[in-house]
Image (spheres, rainbow, N blue to C red):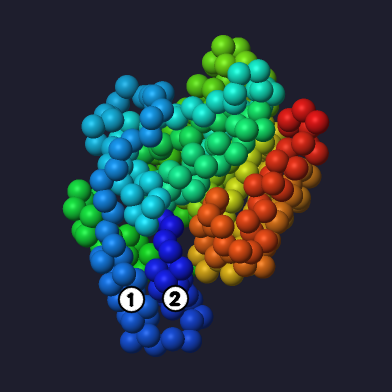
Amino acid sequence: MHFPPLLRSAWAAAILLSGPGAHADDAARKSGFEEFARLAQANPPRPAAAPAIKPIPLSAEGTRATDTWETMFGQTTLRNVTQPALYPVLPAAGKANGTAVVIAPGGAFLSLSFDSEGLLVARYLAERGITCFVLAYRLEPTPADPHAFLQKVGARFGGAAARPRTRTDLNESPAVLQAQEDGLAAMRYVRAHAAGLRIDPRRIGFIGFSAGGITAMNVATAYDPASRPDFIGVIYGAAPERPVPRDAPPAFVALAADDALMGRAGVPIFEDWRAAGKPVELHVYAAGDHGFGMRKTGTSADNWIGHFVQWMRASELVPQ
């Protein structure tokens, strides 16, 4: 979820006040969540049209009819996904370089930040010749009423998920492993259709943000030969308690040091990959908070996507 500065401040305060080791008392913690709730309820999500992109279903189960497209503070979001799908964003004719990326937006497994962590990422990469697929993975069901939905969001961030974490709890929500299944299915689909899409089947990556970053790490530790990502990007995500695979893909990890939710989760990924002798690059930006995505924060975190492209070029994942 992504909000304007005032609401983000209340959100960050709520997360910080609820974290272990916080020096605030219960009244201060309650005040932080009350401010978040007040601002969010005054600016609830509003219905929006789906993007003008034909989705590619990844399963015959579920239905597009449950998709709930909304806008909140100018950002398009999606929730109540029951049928996973890919939204392709292709390079201009003659510009494709053979590299492809599946993009998993975040949203606490309750919604998807479809703009800042999805389509805007895809368009930036497509302009540089990379064939992109934004993944709408299955989510926890949420109430149709926007105010009731926000109450569920507040409860999620007021509980265990609001504590700074270093690892993923695979049992946190049934949607965690469903998203993993959808991520693996996305990799299989893109690889199976690589020839028709003019994609090199040895240069198909997966990048995710927050809950999507958790999904990226789950995909990167649970694949089979058909679903193995050739590289991964983990943007303020976390890893499960799993061993690093013997043929683990190269990893790019980025986060902000002032991220109260995931600011401690990137280093364990880096250390695990390095201990296993696998290529890994870590960027810890001084500021940017959680969920910087493609929104401008005025911090060095704004440069993360350029660093990601530089890393892909240096790693020979895209042509020089």
Going by the picture, which residue comes out furthest to the top? 196
**Label at residue 16:** none
**Label at residue 13:** 2
- Specify few, some or many for label 2: CA neighbours under 10 Å numbering under 14, 14-19, or 20 or more: some
User: Residue, x 33% and y 76% (percent of image)?
Assistant: 35
User: Residue, x 38% and y 65% (percent of image)?
Assistant: 157
Position in image of residue 119 (x %, y %):
49, 39
Q: Is residue 195 above or below residue 252?
A: above
- Residue toward you, 134 or 116: 116
Circles 1, 2 touching at the beta carbon (< 8 Å)? yes
**Is 81 left or right of 124, judged from the image as shown?**
left
**Label at residue 35:** 1
**Label 1, label 2: how many angstroms apart (C-alpha)?**
9 Å
User: Residue, x 54% and y 22% (percent of image)?
Assistant: 190
Position in image of residue 132 (x %, y %):
56, 30
- Specify few, some or many for label 1: CA neighbours under 10 Å numbering under 14, 14-19, or 20 or more: some
> Where, quadrant-wise, is the C terminus in this rendering?
top right
Position in image of residue 93 (x %, y %):
61, 18
Q: Is residue 192 above or below residue 46?
A: above
Residue type indicated by callout 2: Ala
Residue type indicated by callout 1: Glu
- Residue toward you, 292 or 66: 292
Q: Would residue 214 be seen by someone viewing this image from the given angle?
A: no
Q: Is residue 21 above or below residue 174?
A: below
